[in-house]
């Protein structure tokens, strides 16, 4: 794994990670087994610099979720919509749930990660779809 440019913007690496997430995704794991999302140069749990890219599991389980009724300014989503934190084993990923209403989701619901373009921000958005 190459070292990122220390003078690069704080979100450097997100675009590359979003590209990879659209194709299955990965997370960063240190030699001690701690999982984190990129970009990382040092494990925040133990300080290890021995990091590797590991494949993100294909399916995760909803750990928590919330139905949003008032969207943040400029976010571009029409409320109500559901945001969720999804457990993928060593890491948790936050995104918006598609194709399921809040009434159809419960803790443990199986979902797959995906990426969409957010027209309002002109950035990519992590989304989850039913598995």
Image: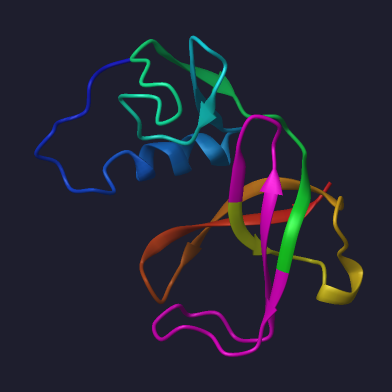
Image label count: 0
Q: Quadrant of residue 49?
A: top left
Check the image and tell me how it is coloured. Answer: rainbow
Q: Which residues are magenta?
A: 66-93
The residue positioned farthest toward the front in the image shown = 46
Q: Quadrant of residue 3?
A: top left
Q: Measuring 18% from the left and 48% from the top, which residue is drawn there? A: 9
Specify whether 3 is left or right of 89.
left
* Viewer-proximal residue among 16 and 68: 68
Q: Is residue 91 magenta?
A: yes
Q: Measuring 66% from the left and 46% from the top, which residue is drawn there? A: 113
Specify whether 32 is left or right of 41.
right
Image position, residue 37 (x, y; %)? 48, 36
- Above or below for 66 versus 128: below
Q: Measuring 69% from the left and 49% from the top, which residue is drawn there? A: 86
Image position, residue 73 (x, y; %)? 41, 86
- Above or below for 37 versus 125: above
Image position, residue 31 (x, y; %)? 49, 9
Q: Is residue 41 magenta?
A: no
Image position, residue 56 (x, y; %)? 63, 29
- Give the position of the N terminus as an image quadrant: top left
Q: Measuring 55% from the left and 80% from the top, which residue is drawn there? A: 77
The residue positioned farthest toward the bottom in the image shown = 70
Specify whether 48 is left or right of 69.
left
Specify whether 41 is left or right of 96.
left
């Amino acid at each position: 794994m190459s070292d990122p440019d220390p003078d690069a913007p704080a979100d450097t690496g997100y675009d590359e990670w979003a590209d990879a997430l659209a194709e299955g995704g990965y997370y960063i794991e240190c030699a001690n087994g701690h999982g984190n999302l990129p970009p990382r140069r040092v494990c925040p749990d133990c300080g290890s610099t021995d990091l590797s890219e590991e494949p993100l599991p294909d399916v995760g389980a909803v750990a928590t979720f919330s139905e949003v009724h008032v969207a943040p300014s400029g976010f571009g989503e029409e409320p109500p919509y559901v945001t969720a934190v999804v457990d993928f084993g060593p890491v948790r990923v936050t995104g918006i749930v598609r194709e399921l209403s809040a009434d159809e989701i419960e803790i443990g619901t199986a979902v797959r990660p995906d990426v969409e373009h957010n027209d309002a921000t002109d950035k990519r958005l992590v989304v989850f779809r039913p598995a």
